[in-house]
Image (cartoon, rainbow, N blue to C red):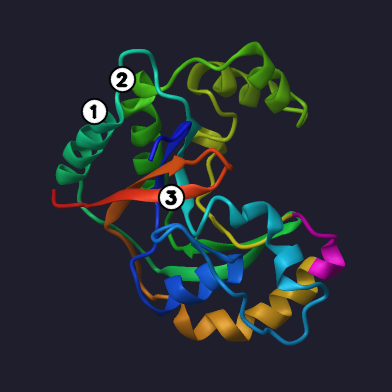
Amino acid sequence: MDYRRYAIYYTPAPGPLSQVCSAWLGWDMTTGNELAHPDVAGLPLPVAQITETPRKYGLHATMKPPFRLAQGATPAMLDDALASFCAQRPAVTMDGLELARLGRFLALRPLGNEGPLNALAADIVRGFNAFRAPLTEAEMARRREAGLTPEQDALLRAWGYPYVMDQFRFHITLTGKLPVAQARQTAQALGPVLTPLLPAPFVIDALSLAGEDAKGRFHLISRHAFTG
C-alpha cells in the first residue's frame, strides 16, 4: 500500500489491553479493519462520537509525529533505520499506566519517572528528522492556528511539530476533546473497564512504523523490538 505520511509510534503489544482499547477506538491498525465498539455503561455520548477524532490514528502513543518522506528517502530506508535504532536501545520501564484526563481528552499516561522516556522520544525526533520533508507554508499556518507559544513555534520550525522535546508528554489517546463534565463522566465509565488491564510495570520495549492511507487512516507497517 502507498502511504502519504509516516509516523513512529509506540503501539501496545497484542493482548487484552490492546484488544479492548482498539475496539473502543473502532479501528485496528494492525489488520486495517474497523471494529465494533464495546458496550460501556454510563457514557455521556455514544462511543463512536467520543472516539471519532482519534480513531483514524489507531491505538498508539506518538514518538515522531506524522511526516511526509523527504526527497530521496524511501519507506524501506525508513524501516531499516528504525530497525537499526531499536536494535541498539534497551527497554524503558515505568511504574505503570493510568487513565488520565489531559485537558479536554482522556488518555493512558505513564506513572513514575518519565525522564528516560522523554529522552527516548527526543532521540527519535532528532534521529529521524532527515527522513522528514519540510512543512509547507499551509501546514505551518494550520499548526499555528492552535495559538502556539514562542517555544512551540520554534520547535515547529525545527522539527515539524510543536509538541516535542520539552513540550512532549507521552500519552495513548482514547477520546477526542470533550466538555470537562463529559470527560469526567467518560473517565468514570471507562475506568472500571480498563483498570484491571493496565500493566504495572509498564515496559516500552518496541517501536512501530505506521503509515497513513489515502483516507487518513493509519496502518501498522512494522514493529521492532528493543534489543540493545
Q: Which mark is residue 77?
A: 1
- State which quarter of the image contains the N terminus: top left
Residue drawn where x is 40% and y is 35% of the image: 2
Judged left or right of residue 228, residue 98 is: right
- Magenta residues (range): 177-182
- Is disc 2 placed on a helix, strand or loop? loop
- Mark 1 to mark 2: distance in Å? 6 Å
Residue 215 figure quarter = top right
* Residue beneath disc 3: 219
What is the three-letter code of the residue carrying label 2?
A: Ala
Q: Is residue 215 magenta?
A: no
- Is disc 1 placed on a helix, strand or loop? helix
What is the three-letter code of the residue carrying label 1?
A: Met
Q: Which mark is residue 162?
A: none
First in sequence, mark 3 or 2: give its number.
Answer: 2
Residue drawn where x is 39% and y is 17% of the image: 70
First in sequence, mark 3 or 1: give its number.
Answer: 1
